[in-house]
Amino acid sequence: MANHEAPRVIETTFPVRYAETDAMQVVHHATYLVYFEEGRSHYMRELGKDYAELEAAGFRLPVTEVSVRYAGSLQYGQRVRVLTWVKENKSRQLTFAYQVLRHDDEECVLVSGFTRHVWTDDLGKVTRAPEAWHTLFGVKT
Amino acid sequence: MANHEAPRVIETTFPVRYAETDAMQVVHHATYLVYFEEGRSHYMRELGKDYAELEAAGFRLPVTEVSVRYAGSLQYGQRVRVLTWVKENKSRQLTFAYQVLRHDDEECVLVSGFTRHVWTDDLGKVTRAPEAWHTLFGVKT
Amino acid sequence: MANHEAPRVIETTFPVRYAETDAMQVVHHATYLVYFEEGRSHYMRELGKDYAELEAAGFRLPVTEVSVRYAGSLQYGQRVRVLTWVKENKSRQLTFAYQVLRHDDEECVLVSGFTRHVWTDDLGKVTRAPEAWHTLFGVKT
Amino acid sequence: MANHEAPRVIETTFPVRYAETDAMQVVHHATYLVYFEEGRSHYMRELGKDYAELEAAGFRLPVTEVSVRYAGSLQYGQRVRVLTWVKENKSRQLTFAYQVLRHDDEECVLVSGFTRHVWTDDLGKVTRAPEAWHTLFGVKT
């Protein structure tokens, strides 16, 4: 049975870096995958865990799929706000969803998307999520 | 009526750069969006045009959506092969599709995806594709 | 006459991003130029100014020279600490110096360097520093 | 005794990528370290070797120092030309020098610099260059 609780949403903010902009004078579209990655890194830190710890324990969470929609853009001088939550938490697969906003604009979602990951061991073989982590990511689907 | 001809597929190849790898010792997943971008840049150059020329003429093709699936990975020391084609060519919207392979492995598509773009003027206002470019991109849908 | 006061040192910290690592499993050496850039961006913000504001006023500070020495490395899971100060503040030229440390290790400077900049207008013509900014950067040499 | 032969200069060319530009509408200054890296990767490939091969043999060549001077800039739509040569070839240390030009402008060196490397084993311990590679890099100083 599905768990209908709202997922825990974790926020992280940081400034746009000049190197992240392109000749259109906005943040380059590939950079948002790095923002998403920083969003889920922060998500794990907020849960008291760390992806580095996961790697040390012999697990990996490689990305198998990404999807991003761009409705607006960010510029140098602005502050990024990334909202991250677990969208789907299966035994062998984990999906994070993201919204990127400008820090001083609560309303307008500029970029949104998801990244899907598969649990593997350190040789790349698909495996079940370690129990503690699976529980940590909470949402059941 | 739809044009049922097979789309023109353009190939570009280049070596994996060390800076593109990450601590998993493979090309970082965000890098493939840069490979896609290089694929469509090369596509336009092969058609005798250039995106820089398009910008000089007051047009932009910002990315509005991307989707990527990762089935395998590339490592430093290997050569990237990107296949690019126009998937959808509407009056205000253009979609490119991509396959990324290892240069010496004809069979195995490692990463695939698409990028959707909207035609705008240099102030970001949505506009119709310039006729010459629209014709150039060929496929009608 | 030279101003012999110690320069103001501004600190900024942020986590290593996974995308910044390379196949040697440490932060890629080019990334430190981005850390330096973030260091001087933060330096300006701490002074109540912003490089974006400078650009809006028609000035640019392009990099004319960089020098970096690498004595150690950072890994994913660690936190970066960048110390930034003005090393030289001439009428047409500005030099920032940097030290990069691991956040939990006060002693060990991993990477150090400087970036030299020239003041230009928005067409790239070398110009004198705007007076308010020149004063702000303080150190005279 | 010093070897006074002119060093072997290897050229590599590739297009500027859009992602490499920044809001100043030129290639971001940190990108040139990636161009240098691609220059020395190509240098090794031209000598019939490969840095990946070196890594497989248990050696590393981490960067210990870089220096770059910027006299001009590159834009999207232009083609990069990197000239690479060995500047210094010591038993434990190797220095490459670089010049970056626009492909269609033979005269004007836009960016120049060097990267210094130390020979280490795969645990990071400084070691002597493997004999075959040391001979390959030729120049004695």
Image: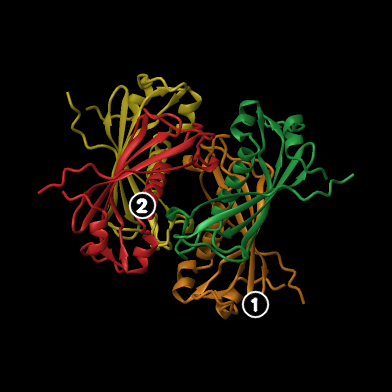
Chain colours: A orange, B green, C yellow, D red
Q: Is residue C67 visible?
A: no
Q: Which mark is residue C67?
A: none
Q: Residue at x 43, y 58 (%)?
A: C21
* Viewer-nearest residue: A127 or B78: B78
Q: Residue at x 36, y 20 (%)?
A: C131
Chain identifier of the residue bearing label 1 in the image? A
Disc 2 target residue: C81
Amino acid type, mark 1:
Ser
List x then y, in percent, for residue B67. 67, 55
Mark 2 secondary-structure assignment = strand
* Viewer-nearest residue: C140 or C95: C95
In the picture as drawn, the residue positioned furthest to the left comes out as D1
Disc 1 target residue: A91
Q: Residue at x 35, y 19 (%)?
A: C128
Chain identifier of the residue bearing label 2 in the image? C
Residue D5 location, quadrant: top left
